[in-house]
């Protein structure tokens, strides 16, 4: 009789675990997405703040600058695995975007209404941890060639 109770208890526990794991996985993805959305909104707000509140400078002159951190969480019971976080500057045919992709395929993206450049190509973060970005304001495309107006230049700060 005791063996039957143990088998039923194990079967019930296994069934409850099987039912609850998808909810845990969904909550983990939601929590990670909310955290990354907040970090990317901070980057966006810093970029917009530079353009709205400061004056651009030539490349050889130190000007307004903002430091922000994007925290890619370590995979755990409460955080989903992040495949990548990207900062893409504006090109002739595209707009500036901040985005991420979780290993589940879930994506998030913010488009920026300010011109943004990443001098050495898109910034891509694939490792967990804090990644610091330095945002500065320059004329034109941020490469010293001048241009039509202020551009936010984003670089890794490590």
Image (cartoon, rainbow, N blue to C red):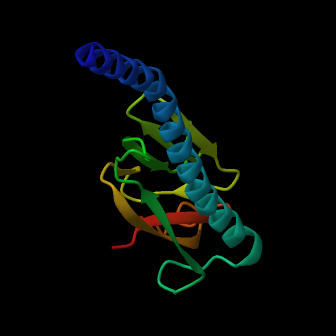
Residue that appears at 51% across and 57% down: 117
Residue 81 vs 50, above or below: the answer is above
Residue 96 vs 6, above or below: the answer is below
Which residue is more in the foreground, 111 or 55? 111
**Residue at the outermost front position:** 1
Which residue is more in the foreground, 97 or 42? 42
Residue that appears at 39% across and 65% down: 130
Q: Is residue 79 left or right of residue 47?
A: left
- Percent across and percent down for residue 109 are 58, 40
**Residue at the outermost right position:** 52
The answer to whether residue 61 of the structure is visible from this angle is: yes
What is the count of numbered marks?
0
**Residue at the outermost left position:** 3
**Could you tell me which quadrant the N terminus lies in?**
top left
The answer to whether residue 105 of the structure is visible from this angle is: no
Residue that appears at 44% across and 60% down: 71
Picture quarter containing residue 43?
Answer: bottom right
Which residue is more in the foreground, 59 or 64? 64
- Percent across and percent down for residue 47 are 63, 64
Picture quarter containing residue 52?
Answer: bottom right
**Could you tell me which quadrant the C terminus lies in?**
bottom left
Picture quarter containing residue 57?
Answer: bottom right
- Percent across and percent down for residue 32 are 50, 46
Residue that appears at 58% across and 64% down: 152
């Amino acid at each position: 009789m005791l063996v039957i109770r143990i088998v039923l208890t194990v079967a019930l526990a296994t069934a409850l675990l099987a039912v609850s794991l998808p909810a845990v996985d969904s909550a983990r993805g939601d929590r990670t997405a909310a955290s990354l959305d907040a970090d990317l909104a901070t980057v966006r707000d810093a970029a917009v703040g530079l353009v709205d509140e400061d004056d651009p400078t030539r490349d050889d002159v130190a000007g307004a600058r903002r430091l922000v951190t994007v925290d890619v969480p370590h995979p755990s019971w409460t955080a989903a695995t992040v495949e990548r976080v990207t900062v893409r500057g504006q090109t002739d045919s595209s707009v500036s975007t901040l985005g991420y992709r979780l290993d589940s395929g879930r994506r998030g993206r913010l488009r920026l209404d300010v011109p943004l450049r990443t001098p050495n190509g898109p910034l891509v973060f694939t490792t967990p941890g804090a990644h610091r970005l330095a945002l500065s304001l320059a004329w034109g495309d941020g490469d010293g060639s001048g241009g039509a107006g202020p551009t936010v230049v984003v670089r890794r700060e490590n």
